[in-house]
Image (tube, rainbow, N blue to C red):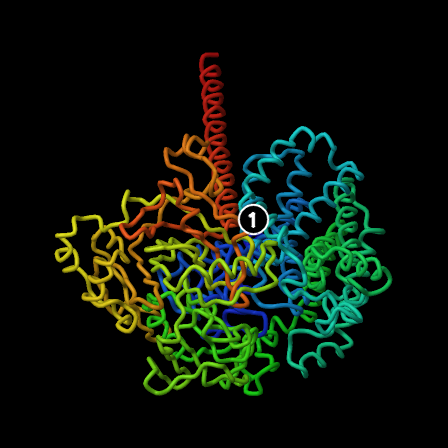
Amino acid sequence: MKILFKKLADFAPFIAIIILALLPVYYTWGRLPIWGDTIIPFSSSGLEKYLFQWISLQNGQYFSLNYLPYFFFYKLIELFTHNVYYISAVLLFLLKIIAGLGIYKLSRLIYNEKRKVLYSLPVIFYLLSPAQLNASYYLYIYSFAPWFLYFIFKIIKFRKILIQDIIWLSIILFFSSINLPNPKYIFHLFLISIIIFIASSLFKLANVNLFLKNWWKLLIFLFLSAYLIIPLFIFVTFYSAGKYDVHIKAGYQDEGQMIDFGESTLDRMFKLHKDTLNLNKNAIIRYNSNAIINLLSYLFVILIIYSAIFLKNKNKDLRKYQYVLLTLSVVYLFLAAGPNPPLGFLYQHTVESFSLLAFLRTTAGATFFLSVFFALLLFPLVLNQKTIKRQNIILILLIIAFCVVGYPLLNGESYKNVKVGSPNTNTAERGIKIPDDYFNIQDLLRSIKIDAKVLYTNAEYSYIATAWGYFGVPIYDFIYNTNNVDCKNITDPLLYNIGFIFTDKSSLDRQNCPLSTNKDDIIKQTNFIEFSKISKDLFLPLFTASKKIIFDEQNSSGSDISEKTKEVESSGDKSPVLEFKKINPTKYRIRVHGAEGVFPLVFSENFHDAWKAYLTQSSSPQLTVPNPFQNLNDQLSNYKILDGNSEDQASKDELTEYIKNGWVTTLGDLKEKEISHKKWENNDEKTDYVEKYKIDFVSKNFQGTVQNDNLPEGKLWETWLAGKAGENTSNGLFSFLTRDKPALQVPDEDHLMVNGYANSWVIDSAKVCSGNSKCLKNPDGSFDMEFVVEFWPQKMYYLGVLVSGITLLGCIIFLICHWQINKRRKNAGRNVEKIK
């Protein structure tokens, strides 16, 4: 029985991990524990707009995000279910499992204690740490931080930097970077690594030569992380706190004290939490006023100090690891206390002096890492005891203490809805259930092909409050893959690319938008939602060449705006017809037909210097349909109006006219394609029917613009190494490498802000096409030409992915070759022994 009990005891840490990982699943089953800043996506399709450097929300914004971990996870789990409540449960469970196993592995690595049952102590402390009461439920960094530190300490302990460890570190960094472009967690991971390396050298756990000899492996790690580092570096070059409305001081005003002043005080950081917890008011009062909890919280710090000073260990290295962890704890107590005494003035001065450090305006992230250090420093209390009996008693008493301090996580109190912005929030429930109305409209929004913004009638929707009890970030941005904008971000609606209006009738926020609709405009109406179209007379296409625009006097290009305005206005009334396709949120193809004189190429997304326009070589010598004109009727026999697009899609007769006029230049490859239409049923998305077609969407002619989704996507690199318009680039490097004529970038001085927000390039067709084979001259003297409009930081992302991919492939090849060599050596050794 004793042997059986000992074997069962070895599984105690894993049993604890599973139980504590199942608790949030049990408490929130069938609901979503989301509110305030806490949100999860609801599908992979809702995530697609977050996979690019330009995010199509609020007229477009530049953010260097990394939502690929999310996207891959949802793509995988959607093979089995689309039920958002099941997905939430799986996500919560996995994050807790990863966190528990991480702290278990890290503890075993450092202390190497044979009795596995003792590792229940750091596991239970970490999974019940009150630091989690400061923040949201989906603590990705809380899950992956122990694993990152595990590989850092592994390098120190074994004094080796293995390629496989470098790969694992890069994988952990991949999953830890969801919070970008806010880099605070990545900053902490690298800062902790540096402190560990320096402290380990001082305490003679490692030698500087270890890093000097392996500098190339550290370089490999940077190359593996290039897909994060390069785009983030480019983002930083454009970043300013004022541009992104990031305020360092309390009340979101840059005056007075910092946000955490008076909250993250040093004594509270000893307890790993502020007094303003993410609990309901009565629960906060009960927790903070509980004398036993306060006593135990301070007792943990006292025990850590006692253990470091008085508990001796024959293994000198273990003492040194304690000193390293104590060093980390001291540094992170300073960072967690932030602007508070005794050294808060240093912290505040540093953050205020460097705008790039604005991400340190809150200190909650530092507290998460303190939890790791406290969990590891409490572990020696169960070591070095004279008898096993005492060891077990101390272990049990400490676990009981952890359960008392972390009881809101045990009894489900921390998962109850918090009443903040909606008076209808049910604080007795754990999580919310989103009404089916929001999902029932999902397929309709997916079906709409016209590239148009969806106006939400909230005055602004940085946060929303609903009659059914939700308060937090807009769920619309995560359910729908649409370009959403609120009333705050538009002035004259005629100047914006708004095609639809979304009214959430359950919203408690003020709704006074400049656009309105009547009953005839309603496309779909439910209990909570009214989805309408606007009059097509008011619709401004995403790209136009209309000369009725307003040049902004505050352009940053340094151009003479008045001169540019005169050039456009004096060029006659006739505007060219545009044909365009959205390839992705950072790249568009535009074919210009019948250009004369000077015209503006207007792009109705927020102005940014990083948007570039390139004159490109068309994929065909002439801008005509692929087959001879006499076969047009045969081609059009495959044309159909796609479901949900009858108002916006060109009819067969209209398309015929567009082709004859040269406004539509391709109908695609005429291969059969499919659209899988979905329906929402029993909290899950299921296939309703499959629509087949051969010719993709072609819009009606709106203000001289036709959207043609049959245009080619082109090559990823077609605008790379572009020359400047007017330069001779026929013999350039690009031509040599690709056998293509390089694209020509429209000069930056011709890139201007118009309509108070949008991009515009002033194109002089005669000048651009003079001696240029890229243009096609028409019989009437006008020109046809093709442009690609691209957000160039996306290229840096592709470059980073390329560098990371090549490096990863090289590492894998190296490991395979290394494994094969070792295998041959072992086989050779065995053969020698047999001969002997």
412, above or below 344, in the image: below
Question: Relative to 713, is 457 on the left or the right?
Answer: right
Residue 21, by quadrant, is bottom right
Of all residues, the one furthest to the top in this rendering is: 836
| Quadrant containing the N terminus in the rendered view | bottom right
The spot of residue 703 in percent (x, y) is: 36, 68
The spot of residue 427 in percent (x, y) is: 57, 83
User: Considering depth in this image, is 188 or 555 the residue closer to the camera?
Assistant: 555
The spot of residue 303 in percent (x, y) is: 79, 59
User: Considering depth in this image, is 659 or 527 the residue closer to the camera?
Assistant: 659
Q: Name the residue under label 1.
A: 231
Of all residues, the one furthest to the right in this rendering is: 342
Task: Name the secondary structure under disc 1.
Answer: helix
User: Considering depth in this image, is 255 or 27 the residue closer to the camera?
Assistant: 255
Residue 757, by quadrant, is bottom right
- Measuring 75% from the left and 43% from the top, which residue is drawn there? 318
Q: Residues within 10 Å of mark 1 (few under 14, many from 20)?
A: many
**Does any portion of residue 568 appear in the rendered image?**
yes
Question: Relative to 283, is 254 on the left or the right?
Answer: right
**Does any portion of residue 296 appear in the rendered image?**
no
Question: Relative to 151, is 831 on the left or the right?
Answer: left
The spot of residue 304 in percent (x, y) is: 79, 57
